[in-house]
Image (spheres, rainbow, N blue to C red):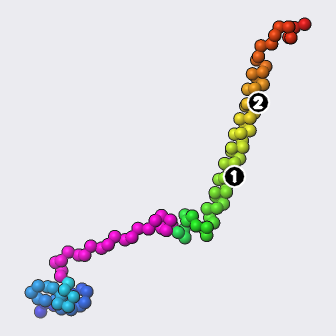
């Protein structure tokens, strides 16, 4: 005796068609296409993790403050070096100007 049962409702399959008489499951029918999983945005995907940008995640706050402070210090040093270089250029330019002969000799 050959017994075959439906995998969905455990009803014995029809011996001629192999279709379930209760739920109409057909083993030869193509499987139903599954709907694609809804994709969430990046913000929703990483919410609650260490990469979250929420106010609750304070792990990123100190790093951003360190980055800002480092940027301010570097820009300050560049500005001081630029000011010093500008003063050297101006003083060298003033020293290299031609002076009239009557002012420089006695």
Q: Which residues are magenta?
A: 26-46
Q: Nearer the viewer, mark 1 or mark 2?
A: 2
Up the image or down, 87 lies above or below 33; here it is above
Q: Count how many numbered circles sit on residues in the image.
A: 2
Q: Residue at x 85, y 8 (%)?
A: 102
| Mark 2, other Cα within 10 Å: few <14 / some 14–19 / many ≥20 | few
Q: Nearer the viewer, residue 3 or 6?
A: 6
Residue 71 screen position, x and y as percent: 66, 48
Residue ID for mark 2: 87
13 left or right, relative to 88: left
Q: Who comes first in sequence, dot 1 or dot 2?
A: 1
Q: Residue furthest right?
A: 106
Up the image or down, 26 lies above or below 99; here it is below
Residue 4 visible in rendering = no
Q: Residue at x 64, y 61 (%)?
A: 61
Please identify the dominant SS of the magenta region.
loop
Residue 43 screen position, x and y as percent: 50, 65
85 left or right, relative to 49: right
Residue ID for mark 1: 69
Q: Is residue 27 magenta?
A: yes
């Amino acid at each position: 005796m050959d017994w075959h049962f439906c995998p969905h409702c455990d009803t014995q399959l029809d011996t001629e068609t192999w279709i379930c008489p209760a739920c109409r499951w057909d083993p030869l029918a193509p499987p139903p296409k599954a709907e694609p999983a809804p994709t969430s945005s990046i913000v929703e995907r990483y919410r609650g993790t260490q990469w979250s940008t929420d106010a609750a995640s304070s792990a990123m706050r100190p790093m951003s403050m360190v980055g800002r402070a480092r940027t301010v210090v570097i820009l300050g040093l560049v500005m001081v070096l630029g000011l010093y270089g500008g003063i050297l250029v101006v003083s060298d330019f003033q020293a290299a100007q031609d002076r009239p002969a009557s002012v420089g000799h006695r």
